[in-house]
Amino acid sequence: MSGVDSPDILAAYDAVRSDKDATNWLLLSYASAVGDKLVLSGTGTGGLSEVVSKLDDSQVNYAYVRVEYNNDSESKRVKFVLIVWIGENVKVMRKARVSIESGSVKRVLSHHSVQIDARELGDLNEEDIVARLRRAGGADYNGGRG
């Protein structure tokens, strides 16, 4: 896939993963309506809710998000989520290629606990995502059932 390992995307990925950088999300988009070139279309510090507000119904986007949550009063966890967004108005051929092209994205944005395949904003509820992260982490000190 063209562009997914570009210096600006790799730098944004490192920033999201860094404990010393406030950046907690990045968003990738296709450079044009045809082709597979990805570009960094945004980064931010507002977490999951901010990146979700940037998703476009006519686009396929890939978001990488740092999510912090408390297991109990004594511990905080940091996990990473890869979101594969396919907006409802995406053209059929672009949708069909996502399963192939997302493999390259997953190889570059490789350190994530869960992948969320989202078609509508309801798929990106923060409480539901944290619950999935707790299950993926193997420890839930709040008594949740997986």
Image (cartoon, rainbow, N blue to C red):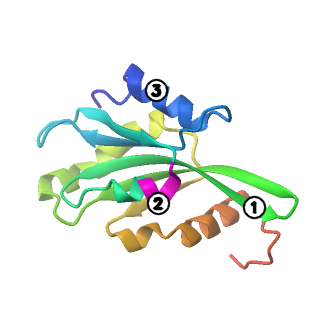
Q: Where 135 falls versus 60 (above or below)?
A: below
Q: Which residue is mark 1?
A: 70
Q: Which residue is mark 2?
A: 49
Q: Which is more toward the observer, 136 or 68? A: 68
Q: Is residue 66 above or below residue 130?
A: above
Residue 48 belongs to magenta span: yes
Question: Residue 39, percent across and down?
Answer: 29, 33
Q: Nearer the viewer, residue 43 or 95?
A: 43
Q: Residues within 10 Å of mark 2 (few under 14, many from 20)?
A: few
The part of the image, by quadrant, that contains residue 18 is top right
Q: Residue furthest top?
A: 7
Reply above or below: 20 against 145: above
Q: CA distance from mark 3 to mark 2?
A: 23 Å
Numbered disc 1: secondary structure: strand
Task: Determine which residue is flagged by label 3.
Answer: 10
- Which circle, 1 or 3, is nearer the viewer? 1
